[in-house]
Image (spheres, grey):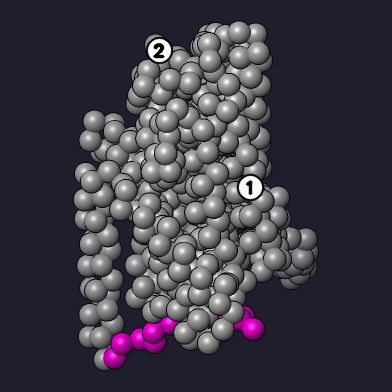
Amino acid sequence: MRRNDSDDYDEYYDDYYEYEDYEEPQPYFLSTRDLIFYCLAFMTPAATTLIYAKAQTAAHGALAGSYLVALVLVFLTLLSYRRLSRAFHEGGSVFSYTGHGIHRRAGLFTGWAAILFYLTLASSFFMIGADTAATMFSPVPYMFWLILIAVVSGVIVLFGQRLSSLAVTVITLGVIGMTAIYILVCFISASKGVAPEGSSLRTAFAGTEAGLGNVMSGAALACLSFLGFDSVTTLTEETEHAKRSTGKAMAIACACAAALFFFQALASAVIAPDYALLDPSGAMAVIAGVAGGAPMQALLSLSVILASFAIGIAGVTAASRMLGIMLNEAGAGRSRGNHSADGSLLDDLFPQTGAPPRNVIICFVAAVLIALFMPGRDFALAFDLARFAGILCFMLVNAASLIFFWFKKNDQAYVRSLIIPAAGFLASLWIWINIDPHSFGIGVIFALVGVIIIAASFLYERLVFGAAPAGEPSERNDYE
């Protein structure tokens, strides 16, 4: 049967009006509050739970004091991050900072180290959360919890920045609340005579016969708790007023985290002042049991499990953004914007991911594989690998700040352009060389893999283009 021309007319305008009614999904831009909780997700009090016995022993009972020293050491690097984030606030992060400050190749290597840090830290908490949950809910096996934590974290990231930031905020608030309860219960129990005779706030802070060397040794381990505050620099293009918000969020988050770590260590030391008697595998769980019994132990375990979800979300988010920045610089991305789509099925399913879904999936799969193939489920090894990569990024960022502002821009402000980045570099170097030798050796292997990949890309560019690319990444310099 022949179609009537009016049918074609009506069909055309039906499609037209349907098109006119369609609203393009708007990207969700992060506020300063969102960035603060992303930082706090990495700087979780659960990290203190895991390293407490080792760090308290190294500090001879003065871990609370060591955390204050660690804050000062980390704050030097935070100032370098803050200044560079203001200079390069579009497509920022360590790749751009060291790429502009030192050289494009240094930027690529720093980006590789940052991805290694985000993925190994997420992997270590996948394992920690799964092990804690398997112990707490004994009939359910470890592997089930590992896959559950990893998959839930990855899917939340795929569904977009709005859901991811909400989940990170809610979970982190829950972890902070549980930590506050733990601190309160420990102090109340100590006031009721649960603490051993001779225990006091002074001994909990200063330890027993702890010298400066012991405090500094504890600080080297305590610095691990602060790693990850820089993750928000990967979210620059998804942040509202990034130039102002990024540095502010990092400073507020570090101050809040330091307060939590300090009082957590102090409260634990009041209940168990003798560091020589601490159980290396679960000292804080034992302390929780002494202070509040089985309910307090369960609450502490639950905080670790929740922290695993938060770090999984934050780690995959940061790694996928860093991967996108590096791929865009290499010419593999479709565009410079993080909110761009490549037209694939995944972009139709997840239109507001904040990064191409393939980048999220690559990082998620890599984190799961690291967790699955880590020898003997050794989350301590993964922890040290994360510390190796994170502190390496700290050193390179401090070096970039020094070279860019003092040498390239000839900024003669001695304190902010010379003394602070130089001191931050030396502090980071000291922490770096105090990593466990076995973990340090494995970290060097990963670093060499990055060097080989970057060298191969350099040779490829020489062969294809006939000349080396510019020494700096193609980002705008807003330094004044």
Q: Is residue 34 above or below residue 128?
A: below
**Comparing marks 1 and 2, which lies closer to the viewer?**
1
Q: At which x and y percent is residue 265? A: 53, 30
Q: At which x and y percent is residue 196? A: 52, 11
Residue 349 falls left or right of residue 480: left
Question: In the rendered image, which quarter contains the C terminus?
Answer: bottom right
Dividing the picture into quarters, in which one does residue 444 lie? Answer: bottom left
- Boundaries of the magenta span: 467-480
Magenta span includes 471: yes
Dividing the picture into quarters, in which one does residue 180 lie? Answer: top right
- The mark that comes first in sequence, 1 or 2, is 2
Q: Could you say which disc has been placed on residue 138 in the image?
A: 2
Q: CA distance from mark 1 to mark 2?
A: 37 Å
Dividing the picture into quarters, in which one does residue 2 lie? Answer: bottom right
Residue at the spot 39% in from the left edge and 87% down from the top edge: 470
- Given residues 33 and 326, the one toward you in this image is 33
**For mark 2, does the 10 Å Cα neighbourhood hold few (<14), some (14 to 19), or many (20 or more) residues?**
few
